[in-house]
Image (spheres, grey):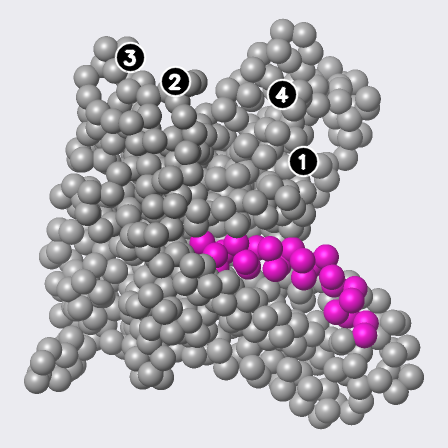
């Protein structure tokens, strides 16, 4: 095969995928940035260039800041919790524990179900007076509480659903990593007299770092991307206490139809995701221990 | 057992087993609860007495209350269409990246990887505009189109194709096979486990996807089950919880059954997909 035929084959094979990627990933990313400098066309008024007006509006928008803050707490709460639980699950399922096949199934099942469907179940779970949680607390004489209806507990209640949904997913990756670990490491450590906790802290956990990085990146992306349960459980309420960034984009873009402002909000979201990518490449990769 | 030098023993072991089971119980509790509610009359939805009569009435009423048959058909069409397109596009692109030398390859590969971070899920505003321009709003095609060129699939398959020994490739070339023939006869068969892994991940992703379908569809003819379920349970017309729960289980049933039947393959597929 000559060099030019190599080139031609390479390009042609790539063409269909590249066209679709350009159309639905690269173009919209750039177009979002472009549109964020224009106004939303309304009726007879066409869209005009407004410079950074949308961003000025954004800086003065308390709901935007609240959504950003919510998203931060949402990520800060769900990610470490899911990772710790995932590691625990993986360690347990990796041991010869009684009924580990069933346990693995129990941990993993929430992962395969649609978020929108399980959110319905959790909604009922949290319902004041009738819900399982209310019934359970009633038995202990605790008063009824509207978990999703009060500002202080709505976001934590959603976070619990997220941890429940994601821990089993992350467990799989830790399990794969644990299973690929050489048994000689444990033998050598045992001969040296290392305790179980010491072995985990100094050997297992560092060796799981590449997995943790992979899981971390996925978890951060999901914290910005997966908002399905909000539609079912709170609709961003009460008083925007559970509005995450993408949910706010949806509200602005598809309920108020202010597409230009939604574009500016999306730019913030894209910038945050780009930051995650940069952090992954320049900061975390260096600190990860590879075998 | 040499691998088990750190396996817990005695009291520790008993405690850990108990903790693991407690967590497992907590994890399935919401699902068990849903099953209880769906299979019992409404007055027993939060009363747990063993003598409560079992019923399928909730399912029948849910099925009759919304066009779930149509929603299911839409989802099946969507998932099949997306997967078929993905398999073709991803195979060709991965083959190109894995085995051909051409200018711009690294830049193009980096451009593909961008989609791992910036998924179509967050580009809803502009993609909606594009679908309007293309005139395909409110169609199943519009739901699937942004996901057909999958960076994840290209990446995964490229890794697999790179492990195929070049000798196999060259032997087939010497026999006079064209590059596409080689792809079909050598690479595709060897990558079968990767295809299975990718297919399971893709099907469960698109079966469960909600936000983009919600935005781009607004009629029964194109809505997938996830959106159908939401439309159904959000219309506040005094539906009781038993019916909503039954509908919820109904929409998840095919995936749940498939998962229980092919549990091992599912778990291994997700594992395989995660190890890069």
Q: CA distance from mark 3 to mark 4?
A: 42 Å
Task: Let me know if marks 1 and 4 both belong to one chain.
Answer: yes
Q: Residue at x 62, y 53 (%)?
A: B273
Q: CA distance from mark 2 to mark 3?
A: 16 Å
Task: Let me know if marks 1 and 3 both belong to one chain.
Answer: yes
Q: Residue A240 in the image: x percent, y percent?
A: 17, 46
Chain of residue at mark 2 = B
Give the residue number, with chain letter if any, for mark 1: A178
Q: Provide the residue span drawn in magenta.
A: B185-209
Give the residue number, with chain letter if any, for mark 4: A198
| Left or right: B273 as drawn, with respect to B148 | right
Q: Residue A243 in the image: x percent, y percent?
A: 23, 48
Q: CA distance from mark 4 to mark 2?
A: 48 Å
Task: Find out whether the residues at labels 1 and 3 contact each other: C-beta distance under 8 Å.
Answer: no
Magenta-colored stretch includes residue B195: yes
Closest to the observer, B53 or A15:
B53
Residue A52, quarter of picture: bottom left
Label at residue A139: 3
Q: Helix or strand or loop: what does disc 3 sit on?
A: helix
Q: Residue at x 40, y 43 (%)?
A: B59
Chain of residue at mark 3 = A
Give the residue number, with chain letter if any, for mark 2: B49
Q: Quadrant of the C terminus of chain A?
A: top right
Mark in front: 1 vs 3: 3
| Disc 1: CA contacts within 10 A as few (<14), some (14-19) or many (>=20) | many
Task: Tell me which label, 3 or 4, sits earlier in the chain.
Answer: 3
Task: Let me know if marks 4 and 2 both belong to one chain.
Answer: no
Q: Residue at x 45, y 70 (%)?
A: B144
Mark in front: 3 vs 4: 3
| Left or right: B104 as drawn, with respect to A123 | right
Residue B13, quarter of picture: top right
Q: CA distance from mark 1 to mark 3?
A: 41 Å
């Amino acid at each position: 095969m000559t060099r030019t035929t190599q080139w031609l084959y390479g390009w042609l094979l790539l063409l269909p995928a590249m066209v679709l990627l350009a159309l639905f990933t690269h173009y919209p990313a750039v177009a979002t940035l472009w549109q964020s400098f224009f106004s939303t066309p309304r009726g007879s008024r066409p869209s005009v260039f407004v410079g950074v007006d949308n961003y000025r509006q954004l800086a003065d928008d308390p709901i935007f800041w609240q959504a950003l803050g919510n998203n931060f707490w949402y990520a800060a709460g769900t990610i470490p919790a899911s990772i710790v639980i995932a590691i625990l699950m993986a360690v347990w399922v990796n041991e010869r524990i009684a009924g580990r096949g069933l346990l693995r199934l129990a941990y993993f099942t929430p992962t395969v179900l649609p978020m929108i469907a399980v959110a319905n179940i959790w909604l009922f779970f949290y319902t004041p007076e009738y819900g399982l949680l209310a019934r359970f607390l009633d038995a202990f004489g605790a008063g009824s509480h509207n978990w999703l209806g009060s500002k202080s507990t709505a976001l934590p209640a959603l976070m619990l659903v997220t941890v429940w949904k994601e821990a089993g997913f992350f467990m799989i990756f830790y399990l794969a990593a644990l299973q690929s670990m050489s048994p000689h490491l444990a033998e050598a450590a045992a001969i040296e007299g290392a305790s179980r906790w010491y072995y985990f802290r100094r050997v297992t956990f560092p060796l799981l770092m590449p997995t943790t990085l992979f899981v971390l990146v996925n978890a951060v992306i999901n914290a910005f991307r997966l908002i399905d349960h909000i539609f079912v459980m709170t609709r961003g309420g009460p008083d925007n206490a559970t509005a995450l960034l993408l949910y706010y984009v949806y509200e602005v873009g598809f309920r108020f139809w202010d597409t230009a402002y939604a574009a500016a909000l999306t730019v913030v979201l894209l910038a945050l995701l780009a930051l995650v990518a940069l952090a992954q490449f320049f900061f975390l990769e260096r600190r990860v221990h590879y075998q | 057992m040499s691998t088990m030098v750190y396996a817990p023993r005695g009291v520790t072991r008993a405690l850990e087993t108990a903790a693991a089971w407690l967590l497992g119980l907590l994890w399935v509790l919401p699902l068990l609860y849903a099953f209880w509610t769906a299979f019992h009359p409404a007055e027993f939805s939060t009363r747990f007495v063993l003598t409560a009569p079992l019923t399928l009435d909730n399912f029948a009423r849910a099925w009759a209350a919304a066009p779930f048959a149509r929603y299911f058909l839409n989802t099946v069409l969507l998932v099949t269409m997306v997967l078929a397109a993905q398999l073709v596009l991803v195979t060709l692109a991965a083959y190109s990246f894995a085995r051909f030398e051409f200018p711009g390859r690294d830049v193009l590969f980096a451009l593909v990887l961008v989609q791992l971070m910036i998924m179509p899920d967050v580009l809803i505003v502009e993609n909606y505009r594009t679908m309007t321009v293309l005139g395909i709003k409110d169609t199943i095609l519009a739901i699937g189109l942004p996901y057909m060129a999958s960076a994840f699939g290209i990446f995964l398959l490229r890794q697999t194709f790179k492990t195929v020994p070049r000798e196999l490739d060259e032997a087939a070339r010497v026999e006079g096979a064209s590059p596409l023939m080689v792809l079909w006869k050598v690479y595709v068969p060897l990558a079968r486990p990767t295809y299975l892994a990718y297919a399971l991940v893709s099907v469960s992703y698109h079966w469960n996807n909600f936000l983009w379908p919600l935005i781009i569809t607004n009629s029964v003819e194109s809505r997938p089950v996830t959106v159908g379920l939401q439309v159904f349970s959000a219309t506040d017309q005094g539906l009781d919880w038993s019916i909503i729960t039954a509908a919820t289980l109904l929409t998840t049933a095919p995936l749940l059954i498939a998962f229980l039947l092919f549990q091992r393959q599912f778990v291994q597929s997700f594992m395989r997909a995660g190890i890069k």
